[in-house]
């Protein structure tokens, strides 16, 4: 299952799509400015995320525990990424991800 968050969404909420375990890829819209902490925590099937240009902040643990996440596109517009954003994302290549842990 793939999903593009609608342009009407400007920020994600805590556990925004909790229980959506079949989600494999997601696009964060150009209207969004913030991905709040633990928005997509423990999405085990999520393999790819594309964050579009308007996002400036990714909160702590936003993608924590997404063990299958292997591809993340982060634009230059993102000014702040907290260290734990990708904690437990075992499929991300560590040599290309200073925020993985």
Image: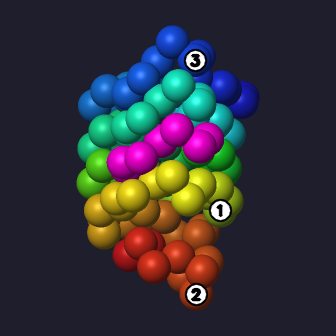
Between residue 33 and residue 23, name the one nearer to us.
Answer: 33
**Which residue is at the far bottom?**
95
User: Is residue 19 visible in this depiction of the protein?
Assistant: no
- Residue drawn at x 47%, y 30% as measured from the top left: 32
Instruction: Classify mark 1: residues with Cα within 10 Å, few (<14), some (14-19) or many (20+).
Output: some
Question: Quadrant of residue 88 in the image?
Answer: bottom left
Determine which of the numbered discs, if any, sits on residue 1 in the image. Answer: none
Is residue 86 covered in magenta? no
Question: Quadrant of residue 30 in the image?
Answer: top right
**Which residue is at the far right?**
1
Question: Considering the numbered disc 2 on the image, is that residue within a helix, a strand or a loop?
Answer: helix
**Distance CA(mark 1)–CA(mark 2):** 13 Å
Residue 92, position as x, y percentages in the image: 59, 70
Between residue 55 and residue 62, name the one nearer to us.
Answer: 55
Q: Which residues are magenta?
A: 52-58
Determine which of the numbered discs, if any, sits on residue 7 in the image. Answer: 3
- Find disc 1 in the rendering and name its residue: 70
Instruction: Classify mark 3: residues with Cα within 10 Å, few (<14), some (14-19) or many (20+).
Output: few
**Distance CA(mark 1)–CA(mark 3):** 25 Å
Between residue 86 and residue 24, name the one nearer to us.
Answer: 86
User: Is residue 56 visible in this depiction of the protein?
Assistant: yes
Between residue 51 and residue 15, name the one nearer to us.
Answer: 51
């Amino acid at each position: 299952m793939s999903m593009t968050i609608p342009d009407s969404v400007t920020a994600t909420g805590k556990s925004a799509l909790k229980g959506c375990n079949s989600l494999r890829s997601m696009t964060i819209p150009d209207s969004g400015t913030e991905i709040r902490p633990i928005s997509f925590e423990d999405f085990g099937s999520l393999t790819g995320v594309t964050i579009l240009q308007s996002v400036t902040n990714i909160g702590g643990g936003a993608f924590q525990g997404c063990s299958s996440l292997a591809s993340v596109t982060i634009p230059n517009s993102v000014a702040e990424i907290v260290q734990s954003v990708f904690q437990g994302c075992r499929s991300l290549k560590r040599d290309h991800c200073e925020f993985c842990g």
